[in-house]
Amino acid sequence: MKYAIFYFSPCGGTKSVADIISKELGDAPMQEITTPSMDTSVSNDTLAFFCFPVYGGRIPKPMYDRMAIIKGNNTPCVPVAVYGNRAVDDALLEMSDLAAKQGFVTVAGCEMIAPHSIDPSFGAGRPDASDKAKLVDFINKLKAKESFTEVKMPGDPNYASKEVKSLPLYPMPAKECIGCGICFKYCPANAISEARMKTKPKLCISCMRCVSICSTESRKVPMPMRVAAHATLKKLCSTRKEPAFYI
């Protein structure tokens, strides 16, 4: 069995999970799809992993464009939802449905925790040793399987009609911004203006990648919004969540 790992990771949390999976599969090849990537076809003798963050209980909108260039041929796949210690909600089911449209069959799935992209104090240090041990056990069970059958992912089939539970936080450049363009170049949603590096709220997915990669630390969410977001997340994300696996 061959393996392929695709990951969408604006701030590195999802990549940390993808790295563990790759290592346990003998340094399986990884392809980043946070920003547009190359067209890829995956044969049916390959087990593909789609690692993605959860935003408001859904997959990131750019995942629809990224998956459009990844083609399977009745290829087994494993959606891996990485979230900031709140909930996965319908994201695994949505990812499974999207993968099916591209020729993949979901044969397992898992939920992992990483630091919250908006407030990394929630989920800090995750995945930790306990998380990793559980993920390694899951990978070993997959490797031991002689054949794969379809596994249904949890979630509400009517997810598309539900309101997304997102926090509308849009980073903006401070006076220290030097206009280097890194945020513009690497924004997953094309939500930053090249002229003045200003955020386009209608396109922004609040992934905070621009904040994490800013060379001058001059992209920020306004303080009042950060304080309000922390208060909201404290109610939802303070209790430790554990990984979940479907196989």
Image: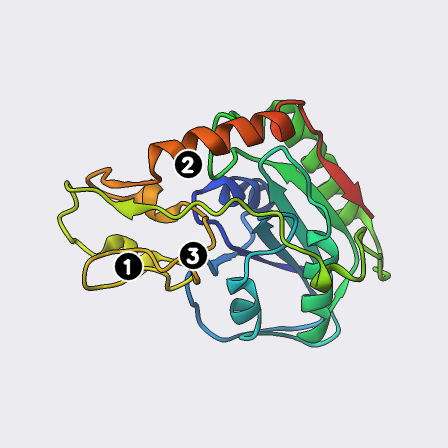
Q: Is residue 93 visible?
A: yes
Marks 1, 3: nearer the viewer: 3
Residue where numbered disc 3 is placed:
204
User: Height in image: 67 above or below 78?
Assistant: below
Q: Is residue 24 visible?
A: no
Choose top left, top right, bottom left or bottom right for residue 177. top left
- What amino acid does circle 3 point to? Cys
Residue where numbered disc 2 is placed:
225
- What amino acid does circle 1 point to? Phe
Residue where numbered disc 1 is placed:
184
C-alpha separation, residue under disc 2 versus residue under disc 3 = 15 Å
Mark 2 / mark 3, whichever is N-terminal: 3
Q: Nearer the viewer, residue 115 or 143?
A: 115
Q: Residue at x 42, y 67 (%)?
A: 36
- What amino acid does circle 2 point to? Met
Q: Nearer the viewer, residue 145 or 32?
A: 32
Q: Residue at x 22, y 40 (%)?
A: 218
